[in-house]
Amino acid sequence: QVQLQESGPGLVKPSETLSLTCTVSGDSITEYYWNWIRQAPGKGLEWIGYIYYSGDTYYNPSLKSRVTMSVATSKDHFSLKLSSVTAADTAMYYCARGYCSGESCFFAYWGQGTLVTVSS
Amino acid sequence: IVLTQSPGTLSLSPGERATLSCRASQSVTSNFVIWYQQKPGQAPRLLLYGASSRATGIPDRFSGSGSGTDFTLTISGLEPEDFAMYYCQQFGGSPPNTFGQGTRLEVK
């Protein structure tokens, strides 16, 4: 059973760096694309970016200047850092496993999400 | 690629047929248009991928169609548990994936 679990501080001060970790169980992190997605309260889904197990990354251009992702294959987790946060970064943050083949791509497994509030 | 979903809210009764639209700003390969369902307080759940394949455990009343820039999620015979938010997603453009803004399917 593949499971993903987000963890990290629920409250971050403005201008500081948001740091989250997604722990993967029941699967090998040395495959697939590992994604971060966020959802502001009452809003839709925004893809933040992905990291491949090799360390290759692709970030949403709208957030690229502030995002850093890393992966720890030996420990089966991957991480997100978002710098210089503002209230607009308040959201539920999800991690998800991305699978791509010649036939399709999709996010079949998601974490339950972790709410991060940016406030002083 | 920008995905625009319509309507924003769809009000229907159980047993009715729901038709949800997802329009892309550029052509997208149908295999790379994905549909998710999200219920309050839950993470999104994969519904459809690969143009018309249903994810594990998804009943056959859910189906997808479309090509080019226009895609449709159809739910035939709404069940009470189907009332939720629905999102489409595309892969392959720039950025490599984006979500639509969602359609809320509510009980009439």
Image (cartoon, coloured by chain):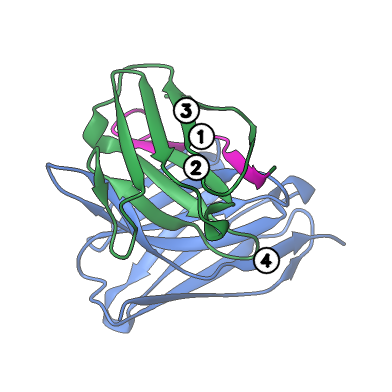
Check disc 1 and give the amino acid type: Gly
How far is mark 1 from mark 4, CA to CA? Answer: 21 Å
Secondary structure of the residue carrying numbered label 1: loop
Q: Chain of mark 3?
A: B
Q: Position of residue A34 (x, y in %)?
A: 35, 60
Q: Which residue is mark 4?
A: A115
Residue contact between numbered discs 1 and 2, judged by CB atoms under 8 Å: yes
Quadrant housing the N terminus of chain B: top left
Q: Assign the C terminus of chain B to one quadrant of the image.
A: top right
**Same chain for marks 4 and 2?**
no
Between marks 4 and 2 in the image, the one whose residue lies nearer the viewer: 2
| Residue at (30, 52) in percent of width and height | B60
On the same chain, marks 4 and 3? The answer is no
Where residue B105 sits, quadrant-wise, is top right
Tell me, yes or no, whether dots 2 and 3 are on the same chain.
Answer: yes
**Mark pair 1, 3: CA separation:** 10 Å
From the top left corner, tell me how far across and down residue B94 is, in percent.
37, 28
State the residue in front, A91 or A55. A91
Q: In the figure, what tint was chain B given?
A: green
Q: Position of residue B7 (x, y in %)?
A: 60, 27
Mark closer to the chain start, 2 or 3: 3
Q: Which residue is mark 2?
A: B87
Which residue in the protein does label 1 denote? Answer: B100
Q: Which residues are magenta?
A: B89-107
SS for tag 2?
Answer: strand
